[in-house]
Amino acid sequence: MNKTLSAVALAAVLSVGVLAASAGGASAYVVCNAQGDCWHTDHRYHYGPDVRAQWHPDDWYFHQDWAHDQQHHFRDYHQGRGYYSNGTWMNR
């Protein structure tokens, strides 16, 4: 009986280890452009020199005082490779 329980426990530990190793870390960023538009993205796209994107780690969002910040404006999330320009979402 002890041998069976040990085998089951070992199998459970190995299963959890395989799941943890196979689950890749999710990346998220906050991007801000020169006009002060900021938005969340899951990928670090290359937008080109016309956008002049500045990348921040995702938790940067929580350290900002968005209600009183006159230089940055947080915009709605959009899927895809687009970007904001003067408050308007531009699809690429």
Image: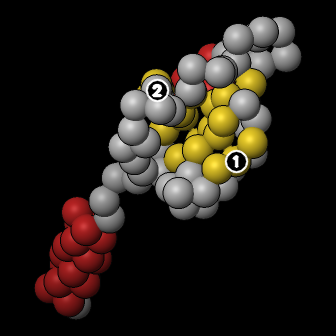
In the displayed structure, would residue 10 be above or below residue 72? below
Q: How is the image coloured?
A: secondary structure
Residue 17 location (% of width, % of height)? 23, 66
Q: Are marks 2 and 1 in contact (CB under 8 Å)?
A: no
Q: Secondary structure at mark 1?
A: strand
Classify 10 Å Cα crowding around label 1: few (below 14), some (14-19), many (20 and above): some
* Camera-nearest residue between 23 and 45: 45
The residue under label 1 is which amino acid type?
Answer: Trp
In the displayed structure, would residue 42 be above or below residue 33? below
Please give the residue where the numbered disc 1 appears in the rendered image.
89
- Return the residue found at the far front: 50
Identify the residue at image location x=66%, y=36%. Answer: 85
In the displayed structure, would residue 45 be above or below residue 6? above
The residue under label 2 is which amino acid type?
Answer: Arg
12 displayed left or right of 28: left
Which mark sits nearer the N-terminus, 2 or 1?
2
Identify the residue at image location x=17%, y=83%. Answer: 7
Identify the residue at image location x=70%, y=47%. Answer: 89
Please give the residue where the numbered disc 2 appears in the rendered image.
52
Classify 10 Å Cα crowding around label 2: few (below 14), some (14-19), many (20 and above): some
Check residue 33 in the rendering and tell me which mark sits there, or answer none. Answer: none
